[in-house]
Image (cartoon, rainbow, N blue to C red):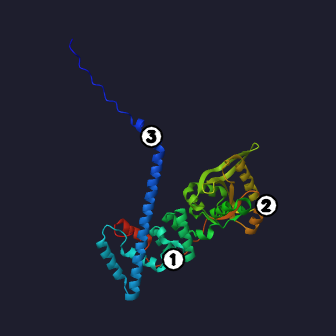
Amino acid sequence: MAGRKRTPKALVLPSREAVIPRDYADWLVSLKSRIASARQRATLAVNQELVRLYHHIGTEILERQTRQGWGAKVIDRLATDLRAAFPEMKGFSGSNLKYMRFFAEKCPSGLIGQQPADQLPWFHIVTLLTKVSADTEREWYAAQVIQQGWSRPTLDVHIKNQLHLRQGGAVTNFDRHLPTPQAQLAIEALKDPYLFDFLGLGDEAIERDIENALIRHITRFLLELGAGFAFLGRQYRLEVAGDEFFIDLLFYHTRLKCHVVVELKGVAFKPEHAGQLNFYLAAVDAQIKAPDDRPTIGLLLCKTKNRLVAEYALSGMSKPIGVAEYQLVRALPTPLDVNLPSIEEIEAELSRGEGGG
């Protein structure tokens, strides 16, 4: 009998899943975190060295200008020579060298107040030097950048809006109804006044128009509220004993670990406003608050307020409430004149490969 060819059996390889350990996924997450952390530290180290280098160069220029009377043409020649020597490096434009000199002049120790300048990106430093005049204010903004991780555009907006004068300015009763650490954090989370000029509304706008505009501009609204606010809803429905009530705006604050109820009033503050908000907070604590959430906080935004009336009204409330004003129209502060190229001009040079860093 003629033999039949045997079909060779296919080699069966074990599936990849079969050889992957059960703890692989957790290990991968841990490894990714370690790599991301190392990359962040490396970026910070590079930035520190860059800022220290810029400060050294600025100090050298400043000293030689003082001793030898260097003019602008020498700086332009230095920029040309440095770019020729280090073509792969950006940051040696004549404009940026002038910023380095200005940096060394304003911060001879390399500190912005008590904050190490090398903890900040270069253009954050330039923004602080050219747009904030007082040393104490400059230090405050530097600390906020380090703590909050602000981008340069965010820093620019907060400087323009004079956040240092507004943060922590609301009338509150937090010290009577919240534990000390949370009370201080909650006070710092609120400001007075809130600036809503980005809505494009006039002073006579009514509550519903303001609320609608805030939702349309929710990104700008969240930026003005500050870090930690997460939007949950508008006209948020509550039912108590068969009756319906609607909260204007409901947020969750990720840093305070609590809900925040915001009520808009298109008129001056009245004591009965606090009573209404106190009721809403009690309902949210009873119906929405999770067991591990902290007590819900209320924020009344009014067209105007009498501070003493607000303090008296809040003293009789059982829930933590803050009262602040909002502004729909305002005058912008006069910008500083430092006789230096703008950051936008420097960044334009960067994009052409001529400078920045």
Query: In the picture shown, does residue 300 fall above or below 31?
Result: below
Residue 336 is tagged as 1
Q: In the rendered image, which quarter is residue 320 located in? A: bottom right
Q: Which residue is under mark 3?
A: 21
Q: Position of residue 263 (x, y in %)?
A: 68, 56
Taking the image as shown, residue 119 lies to the left or right of residue 60, namely right
Q: Which residue is under mark 2?
A: 316
Q: For mark 1, does the 10 Å Cα neighbourhood hold few (<14), some (14 to 19), or many (20 or more) residues?
A: few
The reply to whether residue 98 is visible in this rendering is no
- Which of label 3 and label 1 is nearer to you? 3
Q: Identify the secondary structure beneath mark 2.
A: loop
Q: In the rendered image, which quarter is residue 137 located in? A: bottom right
Toward the viewer: 57 or 303?
57
Query: In the picture shown, does residue 15 fall above or below 255?
Result: above
Residue 49 is tagged as none
- Could you tell me which residue is drawn at 46 percent across and 46 percent down? 27
Amino acid type for the residue under numbered disc 3: Pro
Which corner quadrant holds the C terminus?
A: bottom left
Query: In the picture shown, does residue 285 fall above or below 355?
Result: above
- Disc 1 and disc 2 in contact, CB within 8 angstroms: no
